[in-house]
Amino acid sequence: MNKRKLKVIVSIDGGGIRGVLPLLILNHINSLIQRHGLGDDLSSNIDLISGTSTGAIISAGLIVTKDKKNIYSINDLLGLYVARGPQLFNLANPSNRRSEGLRLVLKRKFKGIMLSDLNTKFAFVSYDKTSKLPFVFGRHRRSLSGVDLSTALAACSAVPGYFDPVKINEYELIDGIMAAKNPAHIAYQQARTYFPDDVYLLLSFGTGNLKGAMYDSIEKDVDAVDEKLLQKSELNDNLIYYRFQPDIVKANPQMDNALPENIASLIVDGESYIKENKIIFDRLIADWKMYK
């Protein structure tokens, strides 16, 4: 048993319908937590969560509560992606005047919830076109506490060319992938601000390795963040770091390919990753138990 406090930090990448992959892995970790007596579920263990684009949507879904109870389970969120994927991520036809399917679903699922209603610390990543700088929704932006959660999430997932920017005060906000597809280092920096003296268990969830022509500057940045945090964890015993990034073998990697057969293939790839990495999940649980 370790007397130092453990803060669980979760970070989820952007990637459209490929959000199915982190949801599958999150669900697996959730079952391990329950099996090993580490809490009621993963959501109740999270001290800070960060997400970009689809990762912001999943992050919000994990922590939003009503009467101190989580509104959505991980299974609920996975079911939403499977059932509503085509409506959420249909970006294949720009001439269809910027389908509002995503924003309508966000408004319905997070109706009446403001950023100030979130009890868990959060960092939802967007990008401000005006300043050309990353924009992070979080507790530190007190002036935005009255913003609707659905509006903030729309700002984090407003893909240029498909959705109009979301204007909030002087900011003109678009998809957070323009700032940080992998927000794990942002999550780490936020954790150091909120919990300077604690140990961090940072769980970073990718939305699939992209290869060939799809391995662009954004993907290089994704890997650079991973490498930076891996190095920090090797030098700092206050940081326990895990990165979960499946290979895409069966599925089409396009972020807007939400056809039922492709979602099924994403599930196959996610389940294969879980089966092939039992040792990593066992190590995670062992590390977690050290602080119980």
Image (cartoon, rainbow, N blue to C red):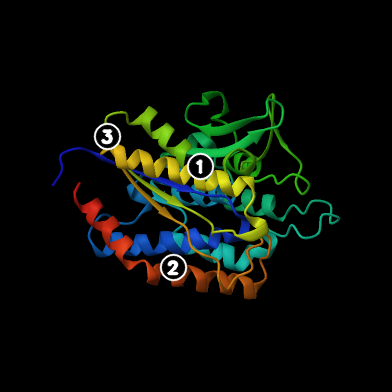
Q: Is 80 located above or below residue 232 in the figure?
A: below
Name the residue beneath numbered marker 1.
Answer: 183
Element on which disc 1 rests: loop
Q: Earlier in the sequence, mark 1 or mark 3?
A: 1
Q: Amino acid at mark 1?
A: Pro
Q: Amino acid at mark 2?
A: Tyr
Residue 231 occupies which quadrant of the picture? top left
> Quick one: which residue is furthest to the left in this view?
1
Residue 65 seen in the current view: no
Residue depicted at x 60% and y 60%: 211
Q: Work out whether residue 127 or residue 212 is closer to the camera in this orientation and state it.
A: 212
Element on which disc 2 rests: helix
Residue 212 seen in the current view: yes
Residue depicted at x 38% and y 72%: 275
Observer-side mark, 2 or 3, equals 2
Q: Position of residue 2 (x, y in %)?
A: 15, 43
Mark 2 surroundings: few (<14), some (14-19) or many (≥20) residues within 10 A = some
For marks 2 and 3, give the CA distance: 31 Å
Mark 1 surroundings: few (<14), some (14-19) or many (≥20) residues within 10 A = many
Residue depicted at x 86% and y 55%: 95
Name the residue beneath numbered marker 2.
Answer: 273
Q: Earlier in the sequence, mark 1 or mark 2?
A: 1
Name the residue beneath numbered marker 3.
Answer: 198
